[in-house]
Amino acid sequence: MIKAIPVIFVGLSGGIAVGIGFVAFLTVLGVIPRLTQLTKTGESIRSYEWAVVISVVMASLADLNNFSIPIGAGILIPIGFASGIFIGMLAAALTEVLNVLPILSKRIGMEGMLISLLMALVIGKLAGSLFQWLFFVNY
């Protein structure tokens, strides 16, 4: 039991750190206020916040318990596609908030070619994802 206490402490500390980072990430992006603004449901902001908290806790518990649902490829393809779109949009939102691309274009001397830089990033991401899924899907 004495040997388990440091492991429990490190696990809880790591979980708290990741949780704080996730909340900070959502706060910086302003996801929930923007969502209520777009849907004109400002009175439901607490519901959105609790939905995020509950879904993160449930996903964490499912991950810790190796929970899986046996479904076929016909269902997995749209879920994977939607998940990829979500991650891409989240990355794009973070990039927009931090103004990474305009700063990067100025630093590398491509101020007038921002669209070209953006398309290079998109095409590179697409090519990398396809390469991974087509050649390394069994790993």
Image (tube, rainbow, N blue to C red):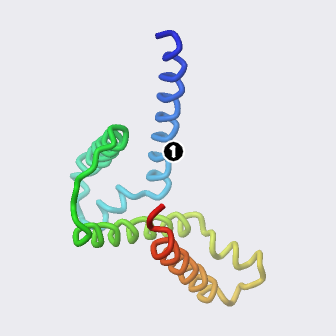
Residue 115, picture quadrant: bottom right
**Above-or-below relation of 128 to 65:** below
The residue lying at 77 percent from left, 75 percent from top is: 107
Q: Which residue position is annotated with label 1?
A: 21
14 to 30, vertically: above or below: above
Name the foreground residue: 91 vs 83. Answer: 83
Depth check, front residue: 84 or 38: 84
Q: Is residue 123 above or below residue 100?
A: below
Residue 37 in the image: state x and y as whole percent. Answer: 31, 63
Left or right: 109 as drawn, with respect to 67: right
Q: Residue 136's x, y, as percent?
A: 50, 68
Q: Give the image quarter of residue 105.
A: bottom right
Counting from the top left corner in percent of width and height, residue 95 is at 56, 67
Name the spot of residue 122 as percent of width and height, x first: 54, 80
Task: Specify few, some or many for label 1: CA neighbours under 10 Å numbering under 14, 14-19, or 20 or more.
Answer: few
Q: Tell me the kind of residue under disc 1.
A: Gly
- For residue 105, side relative to residue 1 (left or right): right
Q: How many marks?
A: 1
User: Would you identify the image quadrant in which residue 62 lies?
Assistant: top left
Viewer-proximal residue among 69 and 61: 69
* Label 1: element kind: helix
Q: Residue at x 48, y 78 (%)?
A: 130
Q: Which residue is at 59% across, 64% downward?
A: 98
> In the figure, is residue 13 to the left or right of 47?
right
> What residue do we see at 22% from left, 65% from top?
72
Query: From this viewpoint, which residue is outermost toward the front?
Result: 138
